[in-house]
Amino acid sequence: MPLTEPHDDHSSAEEPVLGVPGAGEDAPTPVEPEPTLPEPVRQRIVTLTAAVLPGLPADEVPVPLRRVAKFAPNRRARLGAPAIAAQLTADPLFRQRVTARVLADAGDLGAAVVEGTAPAAADPVEVAALAYLARPRGWRELIEASGEAVRAEADSAVVAELVREAEQRAARAEHDRAVARVEAEKLRDELARVREELGQLREEARQLARTLRETQARERKATELLATERGRAARAAADADAELRRARARLAEAEAAAGVARASAKEARSVDDARLWLLLETIGQAAVGLRRELALDPVDKLPADFVADAFAEQPGAAQAGTSTRARDTDDPARLDQLLALPRAHLVVDGYNVTKRGFGEMSLEQQRKRLITGLGGIAAQTGDEVTVVFDGAERIHGLPPAPRGVRVLFSRKGETADELIRRLVRAEPAGRPVVVVSSDREVADGVRRVGAYPLGADSLLRRLARS
């Protein structure tokens, strides 16, 4: 890929270049597109530029890079890479100044690259980086050769990894065979033990057979005793039947008394029902009077329908009197309306808001100011508030989160935008979720899953008003 896309706010690509090796001729030549750089080459170019950046005079450092030049050496290439890449692509004069210092530091290798050649033993990534900066004759071929060398090294690494995996699989197979042999020995021992237990069980079965015969003899004696007891039980059953008839007579008398009691209870319930009906009728007439007083017309939609369709463009909405305020995603009043919904959840794209509202501060101060302001909103509304930051700075300058505010950082390999979309998809359908971000892709994504996207300015105005 190219080193970076040129920024719209730099026009130095049309300025005359210095007479350093690789500079253009006196006559204007057509501007060729930037070559596609392998990732190691791009990183090496940024590293070389970051190393010489503090040594340039202040007036030779472009304005976007003056702040980057003050960074610590280990942070300059990492955090300032986009700005450095943009200036190298868009500002030939700056690139020539950097090239002069880089070639001076490179020594013989730099001189060889300027002449259009490179030693066979030289690092192809280093040669390609110097060729991109110096741009001698045939510099594009040097970059292409570097890309092929990098790809060859990657292929060699893949082959080595495959060989290592094959060796590991062979070692695991040998280990599995050894384990299988041990398990077979265990199974043979277990079989011998089972056979021994089987002999013991057979002996126990013979003993149980003898016990069974003795038990059957005792059972015959018990049967004889049972017949005697059945006769006694029959006489007791006859006595019980007589007692049952007497109990049924008493039960009939009790049921008659219960019928009288139920009739009395029913009459009492009728009185209570009349009182309850009168109370409900009074409440209903009061509600009708209140509706007439407030001039409320009957509606055919529930509040949840309005929540689900709050950002959907309905036919005839202009005739229904939708105000400009209701359609303005940067209006803090719209944010207040959404936060007034029951159980609303406010999700904030942290750096998207802070860099728009107070980007002159450090990242630590930006996070602290935003989290403190969100704590005030959580305390006022009682709503759930979640602020999401990209994970690159998660261990630096994080203040204690106020009550009601959740602070999340995206995981490695995941952006804050992806984490926001995961948060929205995790919410149950129908719950009002408000996402504050001026990123159009984020707004479109969360709107498709039922959330309410608002611009960063709506939250900034709301915080300024608090």
Image (tube, grey):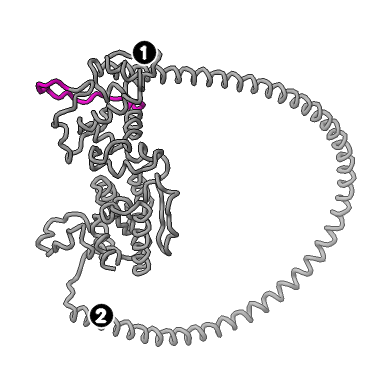
Is 33 in front, or is 252?
33
**Position of 110 relative to 293 (above/below):** above
Report if residue 29 lies within the magenta region.
yes
* Residue displayed at 25% across by 45% down: 441
Q: Amino acid at mark 1?
A: Pro
Is 174 in front, or is 26?
26
Tell me the number on the disc at residue 287: 2
**First to last magenta residue range:** 24-41
* Residue displayed at 31% across by 18% down: 111
Is 83 in front, or is 203?
83
Q: In this orientation, does residue 193 appear?
A: yes
Report if residue 317 lies within the magenta region.
no
Tell me the number on the disc at residue 184: none
Label 2 CA crowd tier, 10 Å (few <14, some 14–19, many 20+):
few
Q: Is residue 115 left or right of residue 123?
A: left
Q: Position of residue 263 (x, y in %)?
A: 47, 85
Mark 1 / mark 2, whichever is N-terminal: 1
The residue that disc 1 covers is 119
Q: Amino acid at mark 2?
A: Ala
